[in-house]
Image (spheres, coloured by chain):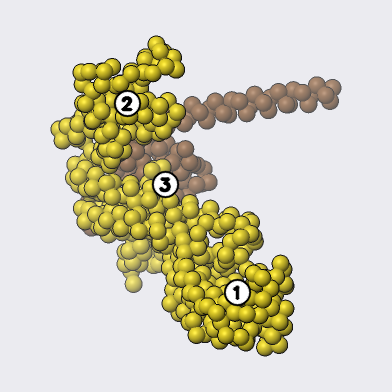
Amino acid sequence: MQQPTFFILTALAGEPLHGYGIIHAVEGLSGGRLTLRAGTLYAALDRLTEDGLLVVDREEAIEGRLRRYYRLTDDGTRALQAEVDLMRANANVAAARLRRAGAARMAFLT
Amino acid sequence: MSLARWYRLLLLAYPRRFRRARGTEMLTTLLDAAGPDQRRPRWRDAVNVLWRGLRCRFAVPRGAAYVTAAVVCALFGGLLLAAGVVWASWLGQPRIPEPATAAAVARIAAPAWPSSIVVHDEKFSGPYTGADDPYRAPHGFEPNPGWVQVTVPGTVADARSRLAADGWEVGELTNLVFWAAKSDHVIQVSTVDSTVLMIDVYRRVPPWLGSAVAVGAVVGTAGGWLLAGRALRGFRRHRLGGRAAMLTFGVPGLIGAMVPVCYAAANVILATVGDGWRATNVHYLIGATVPFAVPAGPALLCAGALAVVAPRTPPAEPVLEPVPSRAWRYLAWTATTAHLAFAAGWVIVVAIYLVLRSRVGDGFLGDPKDVVPWGHDALTLLYVLGFLLSPALLAVSVPLLVTGRRRVGVTWTLLLVAAATAVVLPVLMFSPLGQSAGVWWMD
């Protein structure tokens, strides 16, 4: 799963959000490392909707502006959970390797 | 111009269908994300919208099957345009010299009266055959396909010195053969018995042909990709009937397109590896394209034409409802039954053959009509029709499999297995066992 996809799903895990809401949330969740552009966002929303990971929750049309709120589907929640599990497992493996390497270095120095 | 208007302008990069569905929503998001005093789009946003819009307009739908189809179409487009450039080069200047011109050229090498002048009008270069290839000329002497052969009394040494004196660029003399070139003409001079010369007069390949063919190949590949993307997006918008119609033309067209692509690639690569790159190698493109592309091109065009008439807006309901439609199920079961019946005919014949062979060893098996007195004719009919019609039935079952791939279930799986028999059984018929059983049964 690519980083924008991961953060979009993460942003929508809390509550339904509209386009700008997602951009804002993703920027906050990523600590400012990821700034989604509108073109990228809507390409991802199209793909995720087609894959059944998102659905439109509701629409708000005010003064010629249209805000569609998206929410995760059950499949979307499962996909995000699977990605989180995978990332956690990968992180655990990497941390264990680093710990072993650190212990070996300490043993060598002492 | 207001910011909203700027963004509306940028959103024109997206196809109309997308703008209808998402234009207002995307514009709202862009305006929400803009700063309070912003009057023009930020350049990064502008580039992003333009890039994503063009990708949306020209992208091939996601999925391995779509991408494969687009790649085949792109390669086919590249081949067609490259071959078209070669063809056009022959329209610009005659491909073969006039017999009178050839005789005049030959007279420079040997002044005697020609005993024969024969035109060899060979447009299509065949597969590369190594050192004996008729177009194998030294670098700088590359000819067009087709030549005029002038047979005239004379000697090779005299001819070579006469041509050199006339200002011709003369190649090395090897095994009593040499090439010479001047302006638009290339000649190959050889001898059979040291007193009679055979002077093959060619038109020279234009020096720009290799580059023009490369440009044609790139433009054709890009065009093929774009047209395939458009057709495949039309395929997705179609309902079941439209998809089946497109597949009926598209699948044979794609298979047919692969043949010239592989043929041309193999020949150009083999010729280049075997003899180095030279402009004459591009003639293999014509040889590959014309005979093979004739059936594939129209089939793909028909599929493309069907894509054009696809509904412009996505249907309100999902295209493929999860419950199989009655028509799809009926067709699927019919195709499955037919495939399996044909397969059964082959399997029964082979099974009888194996049983008898295990009993009598290498001895005489007996007349099939005596061995299977009941149903012999029906079995023979199934056996023969299975060989002839089962692969053709794939034109029905493959579209059904593709359009019904979201309905994977017992019916779909059975159809897949049954369709596989139409591919496997004809191949098995040519195996030693299949041939032995077939000869015994049909003899």
Residue A66, visible in the rendered structure? no
Quick check: B40 left or right of B203? left
For chain B, give the colour: yellow
* Callout in the foreground (3, 1): 1
Q: Which residue position holds label 2? A: B441
Q: Which residue position holds label 1? A: B198
Mark 3 vs mark 1, CA separation in Å: 50 Å
Task: Tell me the amino acid under the disc marked 3.
Answer: Thr
For residue B393, above or below residue B435? below
For chain A, give the colour: brown
Residue B290, visible in the rendered structure? yes
Q: Report how many numbered discs are placed on residues in the image.
A: 3
Mark 2 vs mark 3, CA separation in Å: 41 Å
Task: Tell me the amino acid under the disc marked 1.
Answer: Met
Q: Which residue position holds label 3? A: B68
Please report, as a chain letter, where disc 3 is located.
B
**x, y percent for residue B371:** 28, 17
First in sequence: mark 3 vs mark 1: 3
Disc 1 + disc 2, Cβ < 8 Å: no
Q: Are marks 1 and 2 on the same chain?
A: yes
Task: Tell me the amino acid under the disc marked 2.
Answer: Trp
Residue at figure coordinates x 52%, y 30% from the top left: A87
